[in-house]
Amino acid sequence: MSGIAVSTTINGDEVEYLCQADETLLDVLRDRLEMTGTKEGCGTGDCGACSVMVDGRLVCSCLVLGAEVQGSTIETIEGMADGADLHPLQQKFIEHAALQCGVCTPGFLIAAKDLLERNPNPTEEEIRFGLAGNLCRCTGYDKIVRAVQDAAQEMKG
């Protein structure tokens, strides 16, 4: 296959791949690298289901071209747990039943992790604002907010 050669770091691992000029990072992650945790919800950057971190910045991977991440550091949902040990956010989402169909969950988890890294003690309003780019059609958001609040408390120690 011909294409654009890209070298990047994904979840701490050096990764190289070929992609087409118009191929999104979301498609590269899912179809080329078989990292299917990142979900496609809308394909237009409106729902947040495909959220990943690129060079420390929360982005919708459906809006980033796979070729644009040359030399970047990417964090996806697959890198959130430490082996078999879930990240506190993942554990709290389970405990609070903050997920239903699961399409939005990876994006919410990445966005919540980013929020708590920037603000380890957010108010409910700050959590809702920090997660505003992520849409859920199932849960009604309250359980998600409670899970993030609980995780923040646990992560403070």
Image (cartoon, helix red, strand yellow):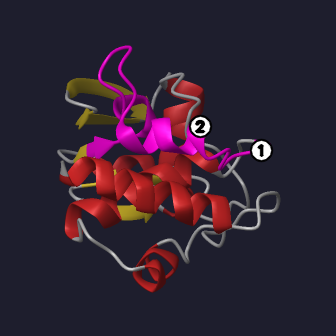
66 over 127 or under it: above or below: above
Query: Residue at 76% of width from left, 59% of height from top?
Result: 139
Q: Which residue is mark 1?
A: 100
- Judging depth in this view, the residue of 57 and 130 nearest the camera is 130
In front: 19, or 156?
156
Residue 54 visible in the shown view = yes
Q: Position of residue 102 (x, y in %)?
A: 71, 42
Which residue is pictured at 45% across the width and 74% down the height? 127
Q: Amino acid at mark 1?
A: Gln
Label 2: which secondary element: helix
Disc 2 vs disc 1: Cβ atoms closer than 8 Å?
no
Q: Quadrant of residue 146?
A: bottom right
User: At 32% from the left edge and 42% from the top edge, which residue is drawn?
Assistant: 75
Spot the residue most to the top: 84
Given this view, does label 2 or label 1 mark the residue nearer the observer?
2
Residue 126 rendering spot, x and y as whole percentages: 40, 82
| Residue at numbered disc 2 | 94
- Residue type marked 2: Ile
* Alpha carbon separation for disc pair 2 and 1: 10 Å
Dot 1: few (<14), some (14–19), or many (≥20) neighbours within 10 Å? few
**Residue 3 - label:** none
Which region is colored magenta?
Answer: 74-101
Q: Secondary structure at mark 1?
A: loop
Q: Is residue 120 above or below residue 9?
A: below
